[in-house]
Structures are given as structure tokens and as C-alpha cells.
Image: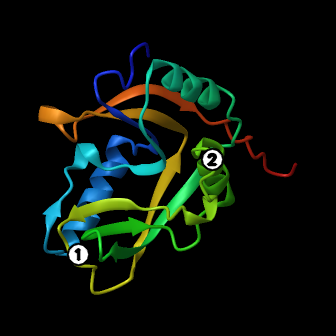
Amino acid sequence: MAGAGSRGGRLFFALWPDAATATDIDARAASLAIRGRRIARRRLHMTLAYHGLCDAAQARALVRRAEAIRVPAFDLMLDRCGGFERAGVAWLGPASPPSALHELASLLAPEGLDSAAFVPHVTIARRAEPPSRTSIAPLPWPVTGFHLVESAAGARSGAYRSRGYWPLTPRPIKRAGV
């Protein structure tokens, strides 16, 4: 982690889907036939908290914050699509985000940021118009951990590199008849 952000990278916390979920998100995005530049499957993620340029000390503080998180794993249901017209972004997201998602985003948010501003979404296209419909067949995403990610600046702009991964607290096993 030493030096994270020292080369001009920007740091953010994110949920990264496993390969099967990323494939499902990519297929759902393709089925929507949105005009715009589709996001590559390997880059699909949900940003939880953006921290921007960070020096080494700030990066270490973010790691300490992540290490202290105790939120249970949860299932996220992507069941709606939308867009941020001004930003030219199309996305998939949950109609009813689980409370654990909001709790996690709030714990990772920069100081002073209003957690109510968090709109959970996975960007599926840029330079796009909002999708013509708003609901989609539910797409489950089992969330078991989160990453601290560096987005490179300059020539490699947009290249992502995980700087750390933290698992969420395992869910208790449900036993029949107990």
C-alpha cells in the first residue's frame, strides 16, 4: 500500500462483482441496447466512496478505516436501470438497496460527505442517454467484500488496480427447525 496515490492515482472504495456476476451484468447491459460506449466487463463495479488524490499517509488512513469495518455480507439485487443525463451515464442499480449497503458506504465515505447523496449503481455505458425503460429482471449479486481501488491518471487513465480487499462478516448459517 505504500505510496498509493503518490503517482497521481485517485483512490476509491468499491464493490467488484465476481466473474459470473460481471458476466451477467455485461449481458444485461448488452440486452438494453443503449447507445453509448459500453463499459468493459472487467471494469464493472459499484463505487462506494470516492476519495480522490491521496498521499501515502491518507492512503494508510483509508486502509485503517477499511480494516475496522464490521458489516455483514449481503445480497444486492440489481433490478432497475437509469441514467445520469448530465454526466451521460447509463447504469444498473437496486430499486431497494439493502441497509448493509448504505451502512458500508457511509462508513467508507469521506468526512463531511452527506451519505444521503449515495446513489448505488453500476455504470454500464458512458456518453449515453438514459435507458428508455427503468425496470429489469432482477439480477442477484452476492456481496462478500469490498476493495480500495486506485484509478491511474495520465497515460493509463482509467486503469484500475486493487490496493486492498476486505471481506465482509460472514452471514450466519440458517439451520432448519432452529
Residue furthest to the right in view is 178
Q: In terms of image quadrants, where is residue 56? A: top left
Q: How is the image coloured?
A: rainbow
**Circle 1 SS class:** loop
**How far apart, in angstroms, are the residues tagged by discs 2 and 1?**
29 Å
Looking at the rendered structure, the kind of residue marked 1 is Leu
Residue under circle 1? 32
Q: Residue at x 59, y 42 (%)?
A: 108
Q: Quadrant of the N terminus?
A: top left
85 vs 48, left or right, is left
Q: Residue at x 54, y 20 (%)?
A: 60
Q: In terms of image quadrants, where is residue 31? A: bottom left
Q: Is residue 124 above or below residue 84?
A: above
**Circle 2 SS class:** helix
First of labels 2, 1 by sequence position: 1
Residue 7, image x, y percentages? 28, 23
Q: Is residue 161 above or below residue 132?
A: above
Tell me if label 2 and label 1 are in contact, CB under 8 Å.
Answer: no
Residue 121, image x, y percentages? 43, 62
Looking at the rendered structure, the kind of residue marked 2 is Leu
Residue under circle 2? 104
